[in-house]
Every structure is written in C-alpha cells, then in structure tokens.
Image (cartoon, rainbow, N blue to C red):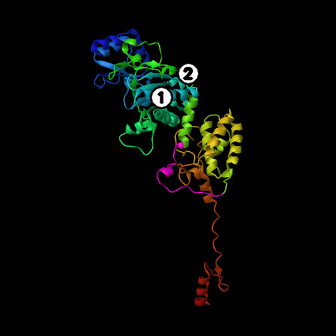
C-alpha cells in the first residue's frame, strides 16, 4: 500500500470509530512501516486523532492489554496505582503456516466454550490470531485480593494452563496436518521430544505495558487488516477476507459476559498450585522428615484447623491444601475422602460433590506432595487462615515454619521423652554422689 491508500483506509469513519472504541482506557502506540514506534504513552480520543497519526506516518495502531485510569500519566513507579484491569490476549503465531494457527485457535476456542467462557477472536494480520477474554469476564477479587494486582502473574498462569490443556491434542493435529518428518525437518536440530509449541507459539510471558495490534489496524508486513471473526469462521478463513477494501466493522472483538471466565481462572490457579514443585526439592535441599504412623489432628497447625472448621471463601484453594496436607500426614486415601466430605458439609456453600471426587481421583494417580508453602501468594494469608501461634514462630518473633507440614514434626520433636538422667551412685559412708560407678570406686579407693 502507498501512503495515500493508508490515509484513505484510516480516514474511514467506521475504522476510526472502531479504533477509538477499542482504545478506551488503554495506552495506544503507533507503529511506522519500518517497525519503529511513535512516542509513548499516547491515547486516542477522537476520530481525527487516528487520521492525524496516519498523516504523520503511522501505519498500524497497537493498544495495551492493561486498562489504565490515566494512560498519559504512566511512569515506571505508578503502574500499580493506575492499573484498573487487564484482558487476557492469547497471541497465536505459527512458524509453519496459517493453517496450523487455525488449528490452534480452534482448539483454544473449543476449550474456552467448554468452560463457559465468552471471548472474541481476530486475525492478527499475518500468521496468526488473537483470542481475547476481556476483563469483565473475570472475577474482580480472588481470595480477598483485587485481581488487577495479580497482573502479569495471573495472566501468565492462565496462558500456561491453556497451553497445557491443548498440548496433546494440538501435537496430534499438527502431525496429522504436516506429518512428523516435515515437522522435525522444519527445526534447526531434532528435539528429544516433540512439543507443539516449537511450531505454533502461544504467547505466555508478556509483562507490564504489553501491547497488541488493535482490531481493524493494518499490518505493515502484509497490508492486511487485523480482522475480528467468529469461531465458526476460523477454519474456512481466507487471508483475502482481510484486504482493506473488503473490511466491514460489523464484528466485535471485545465480547464479554460478567464472570464467565471465573471457573477457568480458578481451575488454572488450582492447576498451578498442584504442579508447582516443592521449594526444597527445587533447591536440592534434604527431603522433609518422614514419619511412619498417621499423625493425629490434635497437632495440626492453626491454618489446617481453620480450614477444617469450614470455609466461605477460598474453598477450592483450601481443598488443595487439605488433601495434600493429609496425605503428607500419612492418612489413607479413604480416610482423606471421609474427612473431605465431612469438611465440605461445613462450607457455605459446599463445593459440588463431583468437584471433590475429581480432586480425590487426581490424588490417587499422583505421588503425594506437600501443600503450598506458607509464603505462596493466594494461599493462607490471602484466604484468611494464617493465624500463627508460638509453634509457628519457634523462639523468635517471626514465623519460622515454612510449610504447614513442618508444624506437627516440630511439636513431636519437642515432645520427645526427656532423657532420664542417671540416678547416680552414692557413697554409703559419706553420702557423696557420683554420676558413674567408676567415679564411686575411685572415691572409695582414695578416701575410704
């Protein structure tokens, strides 16, 4: 496209209006044909702003995944203060062809629909797609903590969870589409194990002030538009549909339904907790103390006792803590199941029985692991069950217990029977006491 054609495209009222609508409460960055960016931070307020930036040489518009109360005031020291929310943008980019991006996008869309999530999708303008779960679809508070404060960690966990859920099926579909030999030959060197994300990247590590191409913006490498689509049209989509002269702005990209992603979010948090390696194993430290017998409830830590009294918030998080803790306490699986169902009756409201059974079945198939450490975010303190006592603190004013599992062992260590001091040996003549018989005999020989 030449400069005049670019100006004509961005001067269209429907295109300008769509860009303005998409950039509300977001930072905007204009990009030039050579890949460099215009000044930041910037915003779009009026349709004339779009045309003026294009007139100054901007060829594409990029917007932030984060929502800001005042984007123009952004500085490195005020992100937390100004951030009011964030969208999850799943960025799919294929190294081997657009067809494989379609396959990946379709699998993710199916996963989201299965979890009841409302989402939008668009062609990126080149080799992939962007799938958006808007801020409105997420719970605004998780375990007493505002969700906007959990960016980018929560977004990364969600993206990693989605990758994990589609990985096996995606690998099969890629082999079916391209063949294993062609896939391996496309890599610089043969891997020890095939991973679908060698071929189709699903971004997972974005950070603060991350940008993505705005809906209906042009892509300088292809001069195609970033066109919103519907899920049913992905597999039949043709790049020719994204030519600027064919663009219609009827399809929305930011499609949301309040709290529709709550179940997915909680599932991702649970998955992350279950697959996080124990801190001591990661650092190569000695394994935790082992105990052969079942450990009774009377020496459980305060956090576990609070969980067992019933929960209103953080029930799923508490279930994960409870099951893993009881397994480390050498409780049999049938004992754990009985205790979990008793505990659930005290919850307000109780968790669905099927959810409990699914978590218990999972534990049956995996090696016992400790629950999350006391310092892990979104556990204990965040759900209001961290009530340290003197055992947690030891002989200091700060908490020295690193994991609830350590608590009973500390108590058992302090309860060991005191070593019985020898009664000693007494001289029958002078009544003097000696700790050993040898000492008494020496005394007799010298004094008596």
- Residue 5 % position (x, y): 30, 12
Q: Is residue 188 above or below residue 134?
A: below
Badge 2 density bin: few <14, some 14–19, many ≥20, Cα 10 Å: some
Q: Secondary structure at mark 1?
A: helix
Which of the 4 quarters of the picture holds residue 80? top left
Magenta stretch, residue numbers: 275-292
Nearest to the observer: residue 129 or residue 281: 129
Left or right: where 435 falls relative to 217:
right
Labels 1 and 2 touching (C-beta < 8 A): no
Residue that label 1 marks: 103
Mark 2 — residue?
257
Can residue 138 be seen here? The reply is no
State which tag comes first along the sequence, 1 or 2: 1
Q: Is residue 276 magenta?
A: yes
Residue 104 within the segment the image draws in magenta: no
Image quarter where the N terminus lies is top left
Taking the image as drawn, is residue 243 in sight? Answer: yes
Which of discs 1 and 2 lies nearer the camera? The answer is 1
- Name the residue located 58 percent from the left edge and 43 percent from the top edge: 386
Quarter of image, res 16: top left
Residue 355: percent from the left, percent from the top?
65, 36
Q: Is residue 214 left or right of residue 329?
A: left
Q: Position of residue 264 (x, y in %)?
A: 56, 31
Give the crowd class for mark 1: few <14, some 14-19, many >=20 residues within 10 Å. some
Please name whichever residue, 211 or 33, is drawn nearer the observer in this view of the structure: 33
């Amino acid at each position: 496209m030449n400069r005049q054609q670019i100006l004509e495209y961005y001067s269209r009222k429907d295109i300008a209006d769509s860009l303005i609508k998409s950039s509300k409460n977001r930072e905007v960055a204009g990009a030039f044909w050579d890949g460099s960016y215009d000044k930041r931070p910037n915003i779009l307020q009026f349709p004339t702003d779009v045309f003026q930036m294009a007139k100054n040489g901007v060829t594409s518009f990029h917007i932030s995944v984060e929502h800001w109360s005042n984007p123009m005031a952004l500085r490195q020291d005020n992100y937390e203060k100004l951030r009011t929310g964030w969208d999850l943008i799943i960025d799919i980019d294929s190294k081997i062809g657009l067809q494989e991006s379609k396959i990946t996008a379709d699998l993710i869309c199916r996963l989201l629909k299965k979890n009841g999530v409302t989402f939008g999708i668009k062609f990126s303008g080149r080799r992939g797609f962007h799938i958006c779960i808007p801020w409105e679809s997420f719970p605004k508070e998780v375990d007493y903590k505002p969700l906007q404060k959990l960016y980018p960690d929560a977004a990364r966990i969600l993206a990693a969870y989605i990758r994990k859920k589609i990985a096996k099926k995606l690998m099969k579909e890629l082999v079916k589409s391209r063949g294993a030999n062609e896939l391996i030959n496309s890599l610089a060197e043969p891997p020890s194990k095939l991973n679908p994300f060698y071929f189709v990247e699903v971004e997972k590590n974005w950070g603060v002030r991350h940008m993505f191409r705005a809906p209906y913006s042009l892509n300088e490498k292809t001069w195609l538009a970033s066109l919103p689509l519907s899920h049913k049209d992905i597999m039949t989509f043709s790049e020719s549909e994204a030519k600027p002269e064919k663009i219609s702005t009827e399809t929305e990209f930011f499609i949301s339904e309040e709290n529709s992603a709550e179940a997915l979010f909680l599932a991702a948090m649970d998955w992350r907790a279950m697959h996080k390696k124990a801190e001591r194993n990661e650092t190569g430290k000695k394994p935790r103390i082992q105990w052969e017998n079942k450990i009774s409830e009377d020496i459980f830590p305060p956090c576990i006792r609070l969980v067992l009294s019933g929960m209103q918030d953080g029930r799923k998080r508490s279930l994960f803590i409870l099951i893993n803790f009881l397994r480390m306490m050498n409780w049999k699986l049938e004992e754990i199941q009985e205790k979990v169902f008793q505990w659930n009756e005290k919850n307000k409201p109780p968790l669905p029985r099927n959810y409990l059974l699914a978590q218990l079945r999972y534990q049956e198939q995996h090696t016992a692991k400790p629950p999350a450490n006391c310092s892990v975010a979104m556990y204990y303190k965040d759900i209001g069950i961290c009530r340290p006592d003197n055992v947690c603190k030891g002989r200091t004013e700060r908490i020295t217990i690193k994991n609830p599992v350590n608590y009973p062992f500390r108590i058992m260590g302090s309860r060991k029977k005191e070593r019985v001091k020898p009664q000693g040996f007494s001289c029958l003549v002078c009544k003097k006491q000696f700790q050993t018989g040898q000492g008494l005999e020496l005394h007799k020989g010298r004094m008596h």
